[in-house]
Amino acid sequence: MNPSGKLRRLILATACALFAVALISPIAKAAEIPPLVTTSQYKALEGFVEKLEKDSNTPATAAKKASYEGQLENKHGAAVDKSTALFNRGKKAAQRESERAIKAGVKTIRQTEAGELAALRRDYDARMDRAATNYENAVGRVEDVFDNRNAALAKQIRALRKQKANAEGPLRKATIQATIDRRTKRASENRKLQQEEIADLKAGYRREKAAIRGGKQSATQSVQQNDSEAIVTLRNRSKRIYNSTVRTLQSQRVDQLHDLETKLNAGRAAIKRMPDQS
């Protein structure tokens, strides 16, 4: 089992948690912006309209009515400006929180990635060490086998040479020499066979090392790709949340402007109802 699996599950869980935070935080931050109805500008307009409605039956000169109209326009404009300022403030708060969530999410993902990559390196380094140890042990076993064989042959050859030296007659010596030649040839063949077996072991070791390196590279790329995709998903999710928050703020502002326009019209109507005073 790949030891990085636990970390992979952790990074996915972390990403989901970050998405949940990103889902709530921008809206929560935007909600911290005070409602327009609590501002002094809105209260000033609302209070002035109420005053105009109370005075709607009180006679007023044209100059007074014009003064009322000017004050009404100014207070309405101030409330509209405040609505715009609150809207922009909400957008900026949502943007800051979205960027903060993305930054925190990317940092967490990269930190988890670093731990996972470190675990991968340890795992594949351990595999490489085991492969090297197995190769060295296999070479040692082959060398031991052939060393023992050739040592036995060398001992036999030494004994045969003594026999030849003590042998009488050319026929006996020739017979012993033929045996020596066979032993010498076998020793030469053993050395060649030993070289071939070690060459096979070396080739297998090279293939195993290449496979381990390839597995490490593939696993590393997979981790990095998954984490990059998680970051893209986080950014896209945060962008959608931010856009949704802005749409909510825009809808609220439309309602605010409609409310302000209603108050403006109510004030104008109250001024219009005021009897003329000579």
Image (cartoon, rainbow, N blue to C red):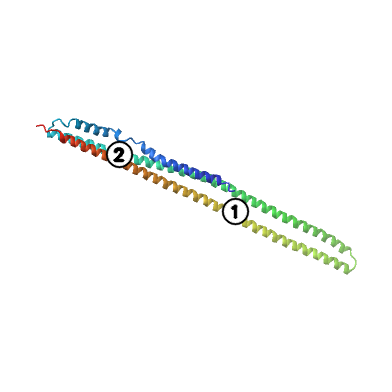
Q: Is mark 1 on a helix, strand or loop?
A: helix
Q: In which quarter of the image is the C terminus?
A: top left
Whole-percent x, y for residue 180 in the image: 82, 64
Would you place residue 268 above or below residue 210 in this image? above
Does residue 54 appear left or right of residue 136 in this picture? left
Q: What element carries label 2?
A: helix
Does residue 83 appear left or right of residue 217 in this picture? left
Between the residue at mark 1 and the residue at mark 2, the CA separation in whole angstroms equals: 61 Å
Whole-percent x, y for residue 90 in the image: 34, 39
Sequence-wise, the earlier of marks 1 and 2 is 2
| Residue type pointed to by label 1 | Ile
Quarter of the image for residue 205 reads: bottom right
At horizontal 52% and vertical 43% (from top left) the residue drawn is 10
Whole-percent x, y for residue 188 in the image: 75, 63
- Label annotation for residue 212: 1
Quarter of the image for residue 179 reads: bottom right
Find out whether the residues at labels 1 and 2 contact each other: C-beta distance under 8 Å.
no
At horizontal 82% and vertical 58% (from top left) the residue drawn is 155
| Residue type pointed to by label 2 | Ala
Does residue 15 appear left or right of residue 35 in this picture? right
Determine crowd level at label 1: few under 14, some 14-19, many 20+ residues with C-alpha closer than 10 A.
some
At horizontal 50% and vertical 43% (from top left) the residue drawn is 13
- Label annotation for residue 119: none
Does residue 104 appear left or right of residue 7 in this picture? left
Q: Nearer the viewer, residue 173 or 222?
A: 222
Circle count: 2
The residue that label 2 is drawn on is 85
Whole-percent x, y for residue 274 in the image: 15, 33
